[in-house]
Image (cartoon, rainbow, N blue to C red):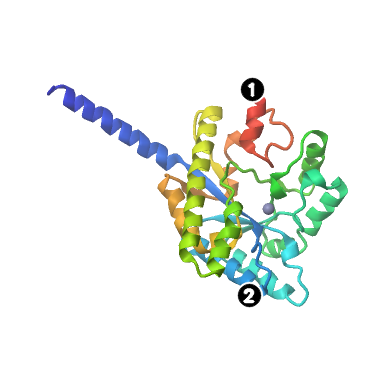
Amino acid sequence: MLSFRPSLLLILSFCFLCSVVSAQEKKIAITIDDGPAIKAAELEDWLRVAEELRESFEQSKTPVIMFINEHQLDVFGQREQRRKVLEKWLNAGFELGNHTYSHKKLRDTPIEDYFDDIIRGEKVTRPLVEGRGEELVWYRYPYLSSGRGEQATRVEKFLARKKYRIAPVTVDYHDYSFSNNYSRFLRAGNQQGADRVYEGMSRALDVAFDRAEKNSQQFFGRQIKHVLLIHCNELNAKTLPKTLKRIRDRGYEFITLEEAMKDPAYATPGLPPGSLGGSFFGGMAKITK
Ligand SMILES: [Zn+2]
Protein backbone atom coordinates (compact mmCIF):
# COMPACT_ATOMS: atom_id res chain seq x y z
CA MET A 1 0.00 0.00 0.00
CA LEU A 2 2.85 2.34 0.86
CA SER A 3 4.38 2.03 -2.61
CA PHE A 4 0.93 2.43 -4.22
CA ARG A 5 0.16 5.77 -2.64
CA PRO A 6 2.96 7.84 -4.25
CA SER A 7 2.19 6.49 -7.72
CA LEU A 8 -1.51 7.21 -7.30
CA LEU A 9 -0.61 10.71 -6.17
CA LEU A 10 1.59 11.09 -9.22
CA ILE A 11 -1.22 10.02 -11.54
CA LEU A 12 -3.67 12.34 -9.82
CA SER A 13 -1.24 15.27 -10.09
CA PHE A 14 -0.67 14.50 -13.77
CA CYS A 15 -4.43 14.40 -14.45
CA PHE A 16 -4.87 17.66 -12.59
CA LEU A 17 -2.07 19.23 -14.63
CA CYS A 18 -3.63 17.95 -17.87
CA SER A 19 -6.99 19.41 -16.95
CA VAL A 20 -5.41 22.75 -16.08
CA VAL A 21 -3.49 22.83 -19.37
CA SER A 22 -6.54 21.87 -21.44
CA ALA A 23 -8.68 24.38 -19.52
CA GLN A 24 -6.24 27.16 -20.38
CA GLU A 25 -6.32 26.18 -24.02
CA LYS A 26 -10.05 26.79 -24.42
CA LYS A 27 -10.75 29.98 -26.35
CA ILE A 28 -13.92 31.65 -27.54
CA ALA A 29 -14.93 34.78 -29.45
CA ILE A 30 -18.14 36.53 -28.44
CA THR A 31 -20.45 37.75 -31.19
CA ILE A 32 -23.58 39.67 -30.24
CA ASP A 33 -26.36 39.98 -32.82
CA ASP A 34 -29.38 42.19 -33.49
CA GLY A 35 -27.51 45.27 -32.34
CA PRO A 36 -27.49 47.74 -30.87
CA ALA A 37 -30.63 46.80 -28.85
CA ILE A 38 -33.46 44.49 -29.85
CA LYS A 39 -37.06 44.82 -28.63
CA ALA A 40 -36.54 48.23 -27.08
CA ALA A 41 -39.01 50.36 -28.97
CA GLU A 42 -38.60 53.63 -27.07
CA LEU A 43 -35.36 55.55 -27.57
CA GLU A 44 -34.70 55.73 -23.83
CA ASP A 45 -34.89 51.94 -23.39
CA TRP A 46 -32.94 51.34 -26.57
CA LEU A 47 -30.11 53.60 -25.40
CA ARG A 48 -30.11 52.05 -21.92
CA VAL A 49 -29.80 48.46 -23.19
CA ALA A 50 -27.07 49.45 -25.66
CA GLU A 51 -25.12 51.37 -23.00
CA GLU A 52 -25.37 48.60 -20.40
CA LEU A 53 -24.12 46.01 -22.87
CA ARG A 54 -21.14 48.15 -23.87
CA GLU A 55 -20.28 48.92 -20.25
CA SER A 56 -20.31 45.22 -19.31
CA PHE A 57 -17.86 44.37 -22.06
CA GLU A 58 -15.73 47.42 -21.27
CA GLN A 59 -15.54 46.77 -17.54
CA SER A 60 -14.57 43.15 -18.04
CA LYS A 61 -12.19 44.01 -20.91
CA THR A 62 -13.84 41.33 -23.05
CA PRO A 63 -13.33 41.54 -26.81
CA VAL A 64 -16.60 41.46 -28.74
CA ILE A 65 -18.11 42.11 -32.14
CA MET A 66 -21.66 43.45 -32.45
CA PHE A 67 -23.68 42.68 -35.57
CA ILE A 68 -25.91 45.59 -36.51
CA ASN A 69 -29.38 45.72 -38.03
CA GLU A 70 -29.34 49.26 -39.37
CA HIS A 71 -33.12 49.58 -39.44
CA GLN A 72 -32.73 50.22 -35.70
CA LEU A 73 -30.75 53.37 -36.50
CA ASP A 74 -33.12 54.57 -39.19
CA VAL A 75 -35.67 56.33 -37.00
CA PHE A 76 -36.88 59.80 -37.95
CA GLY A 77 -35.60 62.47 -35.55
CA GLN A 78 -33.31 60.01 -33.71
CA ARG A 79 -30.71 59.06 -36.31
CA GLU A 80 -27.87 61.07 -34.82
CA GLN A 81 -28.45 59.82 -31.27
CA ARG A 82 -28.61 56.25 -32.48
CA ARG A 83 -25.51 56.57 -34.69
CA LYS A 84 -23.58 57.81 -31.65
CA VAL A 85 -24.12 54.45 -29.95
CA LEU A 86 -22.04 52.84 -32.70
CA GLU A 87 -19.38 55.51 -32.29
CA LYS A 88 -19.11 54.82 -28.56
CA TRP A 89 -18.86 51.11 -29.26
CA LEU A 90 -15.95 51.70 -31.65
CA ASN A 91 -14.36 54.18 -29.22
CA ALA A 92 -14.35 51.39 -26.64
CA GLY A 93 -12.19 49.34 -29.02
CA PHE A 94 -14.90 46.87 -30.05
CA GLU A 95 -15.83 45.74 -33.54
CA LEU A 96 -18.94 46.07 -35.68
CA GLY A 97 -20.31 43.74 -38.34
CA ASN A 98 -23.18 43.68 -40.83
CA HIS A 99 -26.32 41.71 -39.95
CA THR A 100 -28.41 43.22 -42.82
CA TYR A 101 -30.69 46.23 -42.63
CA SER A 102 -33.93 44.52 -41.68
CA HIS A 103 -33.01 40.98 -40.55
CA LYS A 104 -34.51 39.04 -43.45
CA LYS A 105 -34.33 35.28 -43.54
CA LEU A 106 -32.45 34.12 -46.65
CA ARG A 107 -34.68 31.07 -47.05
CA ASP A 108 -37.81 33.25 -47.42
CA THR A 109 -36.33 36.17 -49.41
CA PRO A 110 -35.76 36.64 -53.16
CA ILE A 111 -32.02 36.74 -53.56
CA GLU A 112 -31.88 40.24 -55.12
CA ASP A 113 -33.86 41.64 -52.17
CA TYR A 114 -31.45 39.86 -49.83
CA PHE A 115 -28.44 41.47 -51.55
CA ASP A 116 -30.13 44.88 -51.27
CA ASP A 117 -30.66 44.31 -47.56
CA ILE A 118 -26.97 43.53 -47.07
CA ILE A 119 -25.94 46.76 -48.84
CA ARG A 120 -28.56 48.79 -47.03
CA GLY A 121 -27.22 47.29 -43.78
CA GLU A 122 -23.83 49.00 -44.08
CA LYS A 123 -24.85 52.59 -44.89
CA VAL A 124 -24.03 53.98 -41.45
CA THR A 125 -21.61 51.33 -40.23
CA ARG A 126 -19.20 51.28 -43.16
CA PRO A 127 -18.32 55.01 -43.15
CA LEU A 128 -17.96 54.93 -39.36
CA VAL A 129 -15.54 51.99 -39.44
CA GLU A 130 -13.62 53.13 -42.51
CA GLY A 131 -13.40 56.68 -41.14
CA ARG A 132 -11.07 55.22 -38.52
CA GLY A 133 -8.85 53.59 -41.09
CA GLU A 134 -10.34 50.19 -40.28
CA GLU A 135 -12.27 47.75 -42.47
CA LEU A 136 -15.80 46.42 -42.27
CA VAL A 137 -15.03 42.72 -42.48
CA TRP A 138 -17.63 40.51 -40.87
CA TYR A 139 -21.09 39.37 -41.94
CA ARG A 140 -23.58 37.35 -39.90
CA TYR A 141 -26.63 35.72 -41.52
CA PRO A 142 -29.92 36.63 -39.79
CA TYR A 143 -31.44 33.50 -38.17
CA LEU A 144 -28.18 31.77 -39.24
CA SER A 145 -30.12 31.08 -42.43
CA SER A 146 -27.27 30.65 -44.91
CA GLY A 147 -29.11 28.58 -47.52
CA ARG A 148 -27.88 25.54 -49.32
CA GLY A 149 -26.60 24.56 -52.75
CA GLU A 150 -26.79 27.17 -55.53
CA GLN A 151 -28.49 29.80 -53.34
CA ALA A 152 -25.82 29.51 -50.64
CA THR A 153 -23.03 29.71 -53.22
CA ARG A 154 -24.51 32.85 -54.82
CA VAL A 155 -24.67 34.65 -51.46
CA GLU A 156 -21.17 33.55 -50.51
CA LYS A 157 -19.83 34.86 -53.85
CA PHE A 158 -21.69 38.15 -53.35
CA LEU A 159 -20.22 38.54 -49.86
CA ALA A 160 -16.73 37.71 -51.13
CA ARG A 161 -17.05 40.35 -53.88
CA LYS A 162 -17.94 42.87 -51.16
CA LYS A 163 -14.91 41.66 -49.20
CA TYR A 164 -16.98 40.30 -46.33
CA ARG A 165 -15.97 37.29 -44.29
CA ILE A 166 -18.67 35.06 -42.82
CA ALA A 167 -18.92 34.79 -39.05
CA PRO A 168 -19.66 31.19 -37.98
CA VAL A 169 -21.27 29.97 -34.74
CA THR A 170 -20.21 26.98 -32.68
CA VAL A 171 -21.94 27.74 -29.37
CA ASP A 172 -25.56 28.91 -29.33
CA TYR A 173 -27.76 28.60 -26.24
CA HIS A 174 -30.70 30.49 -27.74
CA ASP A 175 -30.53 33.33 -25.22
CA TYR A 176 -33.26 35.13 -27.21
CA SER A 177 -35.81 32.51 -26.19
CA PHE A 178 -35.48 33.63 -22.54
CA SER A 179 -35.36 37.39 -23.02
CA ASN A 180 -39.09 38.17 -23.41
CA ASN A 181 -39.98 36.42 -20.16
CA TYR A 182 -37.07 38.05 -18.37
CA SER A 183 -38.17 41.55 -19.45
CA ARG A 184 -41.78 40.82 -18.54
CA PHE A 185 -40.81 39.87 -14.98
CA LEU A 186 -38.59 42.95 -14.70
CA ARG A 187 -41.40 45.26 -15.82
CA ALA A 188 -43.74 43.64 -13.29
CA GLY A 189 -41.17 44.34 -10.56
CA ASN A 190 -40.70 40.60 -10.03
CA GLN A 191 -36.92 40.20 -9.64
CA GLN A 192 -37.29 36.63 -8.34
CA GLY A 193 -39.15 35.63 -11.49
CA ALA A 194 -36.48 37.30 -13.62
CA ASP A 195 -33.76 35.46 -11.66
CA ARG A 196 -35.50 32.14 -12.31
CA VAL A 197 -35.51 32.87 -16.04
CA TYR A 198 -31.80 33.67 -15.84
CA GLU A 199 -31.15 30.37 -14.05
CA GLY A 200 -32.95 28.58 -16.87
CA MET A 201 -30.75 30.32 -19.41
CA SER A 202 -27.64 29.38 -17.44
CA ARG A 203 -28.61 25.72 -17.63
CA ALA A 204 -29.13 26.10 -21.40
CA LEU A 205 -25.67 27.69 -21.60
CA ASP A 206 -24.08 24.69 -19.88
CA VAL A 207 -25.87 22.23 -22.19
CA ALA A 208 -24.85 24.20 -25.31
CA PHE A 209 -21.20 24.37 -24.23
CA ASP A 210 -21.18 20.64 -23.39
CA ARG A 211 -22.57 19.91 -26.86
CA ALA A 212 -20.11 22.21 -28.66
CA GLU A 213 -17.14 20.78 -26.79
CA LYS A 214 -18.29 17.23 -27.57
CA ASN A 215 -18.70 18.10 -31.27
CA SER A 216 -15.29 19.75 -31.37
CA GLN A 217 -13.69 16.71 -29.79
CA GLN A 218 -15.52 14.35 -32.14
CA PHE A 219 -14.70 16.20 -35.37
CA PHE A 220 -11.24 17.58 -34.58
CA GLY A 221 -9.95 15.61 -31.59
CA ARG A 222 -9.43 18.88 -29.70
CA GLN A 223 -11.16 22.09 -28.65
CA ILE A 224 -11.20 24.43 -31.63
CA LYS A 225 -11.39 28.17 -31.07
CA HIS A 226 -15.13 28.57 -30.53
CA VAL A 227 -17.52 31.34 -31.57
CA LEU A 228 -20.43 32.17 -29.28
CA LEU A 229 -23.69 33.74 -30.46
CA ILE A 230 -25.71 35.93 -28.09
CA HIS A 231 -28.07 38.86 -28.67
CA CYS A 232 -28.38 42.54 -27.79
CA ASN A 233 -31.32 42.16 -25.43
CA GLU A 234 -32.26 43.44 -22.00
CA LEU A 235 -31.56 40.05 -20.40
CA ASN A 236 -27.90 40.25 -21.45
CA ALA A 237 -27.72 43.96 -20.62
CA LYS A 238 -28.65 43.13 -17.01
CA THR A 239 -26.77 39.86 -16.54
CA LEU A 240 -23.73 39.80 -18.82
CA PRO A 241 -21.06 39.98 -16.06
CA LYS A 242 -22.48 36.79 -14.47
CA THR A 243 -22.64 35.05 -17.82
CA LEU A 244 -19.08 36.00 -18.74
CA LYS A 245 -17.90 34.67 -15.39
CA ARG A 246 -19.73 31.39 -15.98
CA ILE A 247 -17.95 30.98 -19.31
CA ARG A 248 -14.57 31.93 -17.83
CA ASP A 249 -15.16 29.41 -15.05
CA ARG A 250 -15.48 26.72 -17.73
CA GLY A 251 -11.84 27.53 -18.56
CA TYR A 252 -12.36 29.88 -21.49
CA GLU A 253 -10.27 32.83 -22.51
CA PHE A 254 -12.04 35.45 -24.62
CA ILE A 255 -10.50 36.27 -27.99
CA THR A 256 -11.45 38.33 -31.05
CA LEU A 257 -13.38 36.82 -33.94
CA GLU A 258 -10.34 37.40 -36.16
CA GLU A 259 -8.24 35.33 -33.75
CA ALA A 260 -10.84 32.55 -33.55
CA MET A 261 -11.02 32.34 -37.34
CA LYS A 262 -7.32 31.59 -37.56
CA ASP A 263 -8.22 28.11 -36.37
CA PRO A 264 -7.72 25.80 -39.38
CA ALA A 265 -10.98 24.03 -38.45
CA TYR A 266 -12.89 26.80 -40.25
CA ALA A 267 -10.99 26.09 -43.47
CA THR A 268 -11.78 22.37 -43.45
CA PRO A 269 -11.76 21.22 -47.10
CA GLY A 270 -15.08 20.05 -48.55
CA LEU A 271 -17.41 22.00 -46.26
CA PRO A 272 -20.68 22.43 -48.20
CA PRO A 273 -21.83 25.98 -49.13
CA GLY A 274 -23.60 27.66 -46.23
CA SER A 275 -21.68 25.78 -43.53
CA LEU A 276 -19.84 28.78 -42.15
CA GLY A 277 -22.96 30.91 -41.90
CA GLY A 278 -25.27 28.35 -40.35
CA SER A 279 -24.39 25.67 -37.85
CA PHE A 280 -20.67 25.00 -38.29
CA PHE A 281 -20.78 21.56 -36.70
CA GLY A 282 -23.86 20.78 -38.81
CA GLY A 283 -21.70 21.38 -41.90
CA MET A 284 -18.96 19.18 -40.44
CA ALA A 285 -21.48 16.40 -39.84
CA LYS A 286 -22.37 16.40 -43.55
CA ILE A 287 -18.80 15.70 -44.65
CA THR A 288 -17.90 13.16 -42.00
CA LYS A 289 -20.90 10.82 -42.33
ZN1 LIG B 1 -30.14 38.20 -35.72
Instruction: Name the amino acid type tagged 2.
Output: Glu
**Residue at the extreme bottom of the image, as rendered:** 77
- Determine the residue positioned at 82% across, 40% down: 154
Mark 2 crowdedness (10 Å alpha carbons): few <14, some 14-19, many ≥20: few
- Determine the residue positioned at 74% across, 62% down: 70
Mark 1–mark 2 distance (CA, rounded to whole Å): 50 Å
Question: Is residue 182 visible in this depiction of the protein?
Answer: yes
What residue does disc 2 label?
Answer: 44
User: Quick check: marks 1 and 2 in contact, CB under 8 Å?
Assistant: no
From the viewer's perspective, tell me whether residue 268 is left or right of residue 203. Answer: right
- Determine the residue positioned at 47% across, 56% down: 196
Instruction: Name the amino acid type tagged 1.
Output: Lys
Q: In this view, does 133 lie above or below 289?
A: below
Residue 149 location in percent, x, y? 79, 33
Residue 15 location in percent, x, y? 32, 31
Q: What element carries label 2?
A: helix
Asked where in the image residue 153 lies, by quadrant, the reply is top right
What residue does disc 1 label?
Answer: 289
